[in-house]
């Protein structure tokens, strides 16, 4: 068994990653672009299946300030993340979870996107940061199953 200090540090790292992932939805849905973008490292990337790849803070800002995202939040949106499976490896970590995007329509909300998500984190001077977030639509294609099947790996996501 690991010494208590190491076990506590592991738990603190895991909780910090949980906070980032759980904070994504409220940040994105409230239109808090800077808060959302600050979850990523300066050179971080977000690979959105069916939409595109956004690398660096300026590109991420354009995504969250863009017509697609702004349309979602002004119609009424909820980016809901499941509890992630987290694998820590020193100053790197991988988290895998599901995300559902609900959009308000008429008298209720419906799921318009359901994805598997792989978050790659690095510990930086200012804490844990997303270096790559990639998602795959859960639309029956193999990409979603493959992403979920890599939940215990700490190897980086190949560039698309």
Image (cartoon, rainbow, N blue to C red):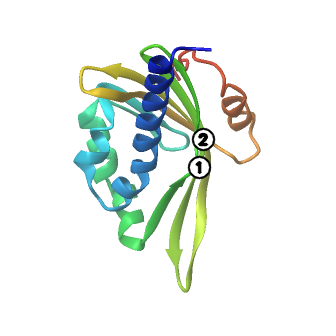
Disc 1, SS: loop
- Mark 2 and mark 1 in contact (Cβ < 8 Å)? yes
Residue at image point 73% right, 28% down? 149
Q: Residues within 10 Å of mark 1 (few under 14, many from 20)?
A: some
The residue tagged 1 is 82
In the foreground, 29 or 22: 22
Residue at image point 44% right, 35% down? 17
Mark drawn on residue 92? none
Q: Is residue 75 left or right of residue 126?
A: right
In the foreground, 40 or 50: 40
Residue 53 position within the rendered picture, expressed as x and y whole percent measured from the top left = 43, 33
The residue tagged 2 is 97
Q: Is residue 125 left or right of residue 87?
A: left
Q: Is residue 86 above or below residue 4?
A: below
Residue 75 position within the rendered picture, expressed as x and y whole percent measured from the top left = 41, 72
Q: Residues within 10 Å of mark 2 (few under 14, many from 20)?
A: many
Residue 70 position within the rendered picture, expressed as x and y whole percent measured from the top left = 34, 61
Q: Is residue 123 above or below residue 80?
A: above
Number of numbered tags placed on the structure image = 2
Spatial CA distance of label 1 from label 2 is 6 Å
Residue 112 position within the rendered picture, expressed as x and y whole percent measured from the top left = 58, 61
Q: Is residue 156 above or below residue 66?
A: above
Q: Which quadrant would the N terminus be assigned to in this image?
A: top right
Q: Residue furthest bottom?
A: 107
Q: Is residue 46 left or right of residue 149?
A: left
Residue at image point 58% right, 40% down? 84
Disc 2, SS: strand
Q: Residue furthest front?
A: 4
**Lower position in the chain sequence, tag 1 or tag 2:** 1
Residue at image point 49% right, 30% down? 11
Q: Is residue 157 left or right of residue 128?
A: right
């Amino acid at each position: 068994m690991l010494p208590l200090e190491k076990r506590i540090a592991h738990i603190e790292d895991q909780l910090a990653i949980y906070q980032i992932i759980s904070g994504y939805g409220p940040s994105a849905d409230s239109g808090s672009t800077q808060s959302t973008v600050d979850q990523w490292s300066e050179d971080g990337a977000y690979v959105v299946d069916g939409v595109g790849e956004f690398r660096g803070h300026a590109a991420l800002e354009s995504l969250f300030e863009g017509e697609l995202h702004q349309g979602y939040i002004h119609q009424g949106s909820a980016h809901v993340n499941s509890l992630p499976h987290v694998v820590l490896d020193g100053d790197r970590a991988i988290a895998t979870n599901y995300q559902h995007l609900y959009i308000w329509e008429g008298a209720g909300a419906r799921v318009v996107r359901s994805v598997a998500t792989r978050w790659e984190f690095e510990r930086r001077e200012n804490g844990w940061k997303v270096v790559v977030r990639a998602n795959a639509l859960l639309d029956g294609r193999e990409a979603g199953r493959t992403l979920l099947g890599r939940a215990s790996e700490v190897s980086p996501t190949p560039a698309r």
